[in-house]
Amino acid sequence: MTPVSFIRDLWVAGLALYGLLAIALVVKRTWRQFPVFTGYVWLTFAMNIAGYALRRNQITYFYTYWIAEAVGIVLGLAVVYEVFRHLFSIHGALLRLASLTFRIAAIVLVLAGLIAFLMQSSSNFTNLSRAINSMEQAARIIEVGLMMILFICSTAFGLHWKQAEFGIALGLGFFAAIELSAVTLRPLVGPSHVAPLDIARSLAFDSSLVVWLGYLLAPEKKSSGANAPQQDQLEQWNQAIRKLISQ
């Protein structure tokens, strides 16, 4: 089996998993609790179907692929924010701090992509892909950094491994970490080593779909009184930040 055919098989498997996940999101009515994550899944699912159908047309596929990448970057950051918003839903000051952090991250991301685009000498395919590649690298760094903060502080945030927010963050964080590695290494390796990177990206994406599907179908553990100390600590942080903001 050639690397190209293996990547195509992984793509087909990913589409099948995507379809199951999209249907499960509707059946379980997850869109009520996580509308951004649901939109992320459905929109990227549609983009992947379009990309697979148009893969033989080089020009159309090029634009479809990079539009899908750009949409995935923006919605991926929005999903991270949605996870934080759920965790801090009853802590207004912490939610305001998280919102401010994401606004700054969005501004930095847009500026990084714009600078990378303007630094190109022309608007051909190669330069456009490099600009978006630079923007994607900046976005993945932000995603991975925010996910690391989330998992490092998971105990303080009252986040446990059976919680839906943990599953969403785990799947997206794993995929973003592999994507960051692939995007960083791609300009440094020759054409002969691009295929292994694409295989790693496809495997990571399929794995994230499996994680999301598993968490969606598994019964979620309800919060118990054991989380009270963590919630008290969060409230202390919330009050401290509120006092700092009011000064």
Image (cartoon, rainbow, N blue to C red):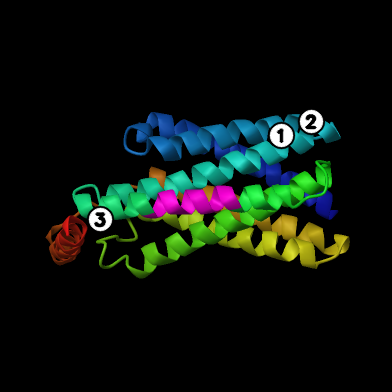
Q: Give the residue at mark 1.
A: 64
Q: Give the residue at mark 2.
A: 60
Assess whether mark 3 and mark 1 are in contact (beta carbons under 8 angstroms): no
At mark 2, the secondary structure is: helix
At mark 3, the secondary structure is: helix
Q: Nearer the viewer, mark 1 or mark 3?
A: 3
Q: Which residues are magenta?
A: 101-111
Q: Is residue 231 left or right of residue 138?
A: left
Q: Is residue 198 magenta?
A: no
Assess whether mark 2 and mark 3 are in contact (beta carbons under 8 angstroms): no
Residue 192 place in picture, x, y as percent: 87, 62
Dominant SS type (magenta): helix
The answer to which image quadrant residue 204 occupies is: bottom right
- Amino acid residing under circle 3: Leu
- Amino acid residing under circle 2: Thr
Q: Nearer the viewer, mark 3 or mark 2?
A: 3
Residue located 42% across and 38% down the image: 36
Residue located 73% across and 45% down the image: 9
Residue 118 place in picture, x, y as percent: 72, 48
Q: Quote the CA–CA distance across marks 3 and 2.
A: 44 Å
Choose the circle earlier in sequence order: 1 or 3: 1
Figure check: 201 above or below 72: below
Q: Is residue 103 magenta?
A: yes
